[in-house]
Structures are given as C-alpha cells and as structure tokens.
Amino acid sequence: MDIEEEKIGEKPLNFLEKIIEDDLKNNRVPDNKIVTRFPPEPNGYLHIGHIKSICINFGLAQKYGGVCHLRLDDTNPTKEDVEYIDSIKEDIHWLGFDWGKEEYYASDYYQQLYEIAVQLIKDGKAYVDSLSPEQMREYRGTLTEKGKNSPDRDRSIEENLRLFQEMKEGKLKEGAYTLRAKIDMSSPNINMRDPALYRIKFASHPRTGDKWCIYPMYDYTHPISDAIEGITHSICTLEFEDHRPAYDWATAIDGIDHAPHQYEFSRLNINYMLMSKRRLLNLVNLELVTGWDDPRMPTVSGVRRRGYSPESMKDFVSRVGVAKTEGVVDYSLLEFCVREDLNKKATRIMAILDPIKIVIDNYPEDKIEYFAAVDNPEDPQSATHQMPFSREVYIEREDFMEVPPRKYHRLYPGNEIRLKYTYYITATSFEKDENGQVSVVHCTYDPESFGGDTPDKRKVRGTSHWVSVKHAVDAEVRLYDKLFISEYPGGETGNYIDDLNPESLIVVNHAMVEPYSSEAKVGDYLQFIRNGYFCCDNKDHSDKHPVFNRTVTLKDSWAKMKKKMGI
Ligand code: ATP
Ligand code: MG
C-alpha cells in the first residue's frame, strides 16, 4: 500500500492534534512526552459533555504516546463528596480509559500552594483584603468600566503576612478577609483585576479534614497544579479562554519552573438535554429523577444504566469533533450512534409488551416444539437459540384487529400470517372479556408451513413475533424517552422543570418475554424484536423479578414526527 492510499479515509487532524504534532516536531515537549489531564471537580456525576473532554485528554495522550492524569480538582469542600470521586473513576474506566498511577488531587498541593502564596506576599505580589464580597464586586468594575484599587492594596508586607497567618489559623471570620493577587485593577480583562487567591471557609474537606480553613481559588490552584504535574497541554472548554491570562500569570510566578499552555475547545451541548452538574443535582434533590444514574439522566452512569455502550459514546463524540465554535448537537445524532452500535451487538429476542393470547385449536394440547431463532441476523456467523412453541402463544395486541383497516396485513379473522421462525396461522374466531376487549384469538395452523415457507409457496404478508404462554417470563419493562420535551430545557425563563416530559418513563408491569431472556445479564445488549433495544436494569434486575430498560427505539420516531409536523 502506498502512502497516498493509506491517507484515504483518514480523518484530518483537529486543531489540538495540529498543535501537538507541531510541538513534538519542534522539540517543544520535554522528552517528547505529552502530558494531559482530565480535571473534574468532584461536585457531581460526570455527564456526556465530560465524555468529550475525557476522550480528548486521554485520546491525545494515547495517540501521541503520552500520559493523561486524573486530577480531582477538589478546592470547594462544601460541594464535594467521596461518592462523586468514586463515580468519576468508575465512569472513566467504563469508557475504557485508565490513568494508571497518575491520580492526583488539587488538595495534595495545599501546602505548596500556601507556601507560594506566602512568597507572593513577601514579593509584594499579593495582599490581604478586607473588602466585603459586595464591596469587592463594586470595586472590580465592569466590562466597560475599570476597577479601582482596594484601600487595603498598599498594606505592608508584614501586616499581610500576619493577617494571612491569622486567616490560616482560623482567627478571622469567613468572608471578612481574602488574599488577592496584586495585578492590575484597570486591566481590560476582569479576571486580571486582582483576582482572589484564598478565601476563608470553615468547612471540613473530604481529604484534608479540618487541617485547613483557607482554601485556594480555582484560577490560582489549577495552573499551579498543572505546573507541578508537568502537564504539557492543558485542555479545557471555551469559558476558560478569558481566564488564560490568569493562568499564564500563575504559571509565571517565581519558582515555578514549568509553564504549561492552556488550549480551549467548545463544550458539547445536545438539544433536549441539560448538561450542567448544578442543574442535574437539582433534579436529583427534587426527586424528579430516581438518582444520578436514572436512565433518563445525561450522566455517564445514567446512559450506562440505559444501555448505551462505551463504544457508541466514543463514536458519538468523535463524530461531533473538536473545534472552537459553539454549537448544539442534535439529539438524534446521539441516538443514531447508539442504534448503529447496538444493531451490531444486540441479541435478538422476542418480548410481547402488550399481550393478546392466541390459541391454536388444531395444535396438540401438550405438544412442545423448539424452533431455532437467530441471535443476530447482522452477523453471518451468528449463533441461534431455541424457542419453545406450544398451543398457546402471545402476540402483540396491535398485531390483531377485529376489523382491519386498509393495508393491514397482520392477523384478523380469516387472515393468515407467519409466526416468526415457525408456522403460519389463520385466525378463525375470537373472544372478548367483560370490558369488550378481545381476550383470546382462536387460530388454526398449517403443520406443513415452516418459518418462511409452505409447500405450495403461498405468500403471507404479515409476520408476528410471539412467545409461548407456558414458557413466558413475566418481566417489568421500563420504556424510557427524552427527559425534556423542549429542545432547550429552561429556554428563556430558565425554568427547565416546566419542560420535563411527563411521558419520559412508561412502565409495563407484565411483559411476556421468551425464556432465553433468563440468560441475559446486566451489561448485555438486547433487541426486543420490533420493540427496540433493551438491557437488564443494573440495579433492579434479578432472576425473580426481571427488569428491562428500553435503551432506544428501533427507529427515530421523533425525527419522523418532527418531519411530519414540518419542524
Ligand atoms: P458543569 O458545568 O456541568 O458543572 P464543569 O465544567 O463545572 O461542568 P468540571 O468538573 O469542572 O465540570 O469539568 C471537568 C472537565 O470537563 C473540564 O475540563 C471541563 O472543561 C470539561 N467539561 C465540562 N463540561 C463539558 C462539556 N459540556 N463539553 C466538554 N467538556 C466539558
Ligand atoms: Mg466547574
């Protein structure tokens, strides 16, 4: 194969790959080893947006033979929790990435950060300010108006050192004092107007306990953590672009001898979804969902429980790509990737969600036959499994009609259909219950018919899936749909609660599923023929009480509906 040929079908490099290749080529990377990091704040569960960041950071390290650190950015003790740390690790592993020994915590650097702050004070580059938060906001100015110097800005070094010491020793009240960098109150960039470096917070930290009552700010902690760890490419989302000068200021502090660069890409946004930990936490707290891992949540644990595979999530973010332009990705692209992947993986089984009983009057009462059903018709080498067949079977209620409309090719009195993988049956009569609903359909079968064929090559147009009554597994089936009905939840008002989809979960208490489903385990991918892709619920599923979640419908009925409605 020549090189030209090899390049066909290759994806062009994204802007980050170009930067890295250029840096490597020009020997700008120590030891030619790139070091990235994924730096979540452990204040919630990861969501699909984070998957993009994980794939970028771990993906680049993998591609260029470098390493990616996991850094828990734990500088806000009041919002952070060990439960979140554990979930973050589990989610990254589920996606197939590993940080090896490179697990770091911003809190590991508290002592170093403190010493650097003391040095800054000694160098006259930081001061303790007693402005209240409101005053500080007022002094900061606006985008069009310069800020003004705090009266404390010229405090003596000795006094600053004493006050900072008192802050650290818990002698001063929360909110009363702040350590600030002395940069420039008239800078056009608000983030450079003497940003806060430390605040007082009497809060126990999940890792450092009560050792500290002063905590460093993000804009101070993050760049120095990057520098300490020897990060070469510090990749974050666009909202940090305006913070880059503060990042560069921090990594240029005397004594810090490694200066990483920060690069920004656009966040992943998907319509019909919320992608903010704060808002997702609110849904959890208000019990509008069953938890962070509710299968309707856009969290990694939610989509895992819903039955999305890690491969489909990686495929999705790779199709979205890496760029600097903000945009909203269509939900249907996400579901497209999920379907593409499940079509290849899912074991096909038959499940009747709304059963109606068929009695085949001319089939012997105690006879049981077994028919081979293909596990996955997409796979030419697919295995098969045996489906028991008996005199009574369930089919979907919608597959029978007393009075068929035009073009209805399924079962109705006098009509013949095929039961998938087995006989042809013809409806002869039916019974109704006390509510006037059809309860039993009587049929006859043709013993000479088999699967797709009869000796006389008779054609039938309808095929139904079915489950033998006496072999059926009684299961709970949870039909999930979008959590929000509005394309931009919260829209202009911000009240996203009003936009919740009242039909985001419909529970079928007694679905009838073929017995092969008993072999399905949590983590398996299933297709219920004609009904969608499903999985075993990873919390509630058991042999005694099978619970299946609908991962996604077989087709994009939503897109079809939108098209019909012209939107
Ligand atoms: P949220 O706004 O949901 O609370 P965050 O940005 O505060 O998210 P962090 O824990 O700080 O969450 O994020 C860790 C990393 O993931 C950061 O580098 C951040 O830029 C990135 N990230 C967060 N949300 C997205 C997103 N929607 N798309 C891409 N990357 C994201
Ligand atoms: Mg954040």
Image (spheres, rainbow, N blue to C red):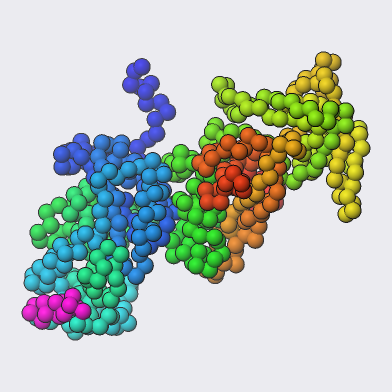
Question: In which quadrant of the rendered image does the N terminus lie?
Answer: top left
Residue 163 occupies quadrant:
bottom left
Tell me which residue sits at (89%, 47%) in the image: 432
- Of residues 411 and 245, the one nearer the viewer is 411
Q: Above or below — where is 65 with respect to 510?
A: above
In the rendered structure, the answer to whether residue 240 lies left or right of residue 530 reads: left
From where the camera sits, is residue 509 visible? yes
- Is residue 496 placed above or below 347 in the rendered structure? below
Q: Residue at position x 41%, y 60% from top?
A: 44
The percent position of residue 211, horizontal first and vertical second, equals 21, 70
Q: Is residue 325 visible?
A: no
> Could you tell me which residue is drawn at 31 percent across and 68 percent down?
77
* Residue 398, placed above or below residue 251: above
The quadrant where residue 560 appears: top right
Name the spot of residue 64 as percent of width and height, x first. Answer: 27, 36
Q: Residue extending furthest front?
A: 366
Decide if residue 566 is on the left or right side of residue 437. left
Q: Is residue 140 magenta?
A: no
Residue lying at the far top of the rendered structure: 455
| Number of dots carrying numbers | 0
* Residue range highlighted in magenta: 157-170
Q: Which residue sits at x=61%, y=25%?
A: 384
Q: Residue 25 in the image: state x and y as whole percent.
A: 20, 36
Query: Which percent across, then down, holds residue 17?
Result: 31, 40
- Characterize the magenta stretch by its predominant secondary structure: helix
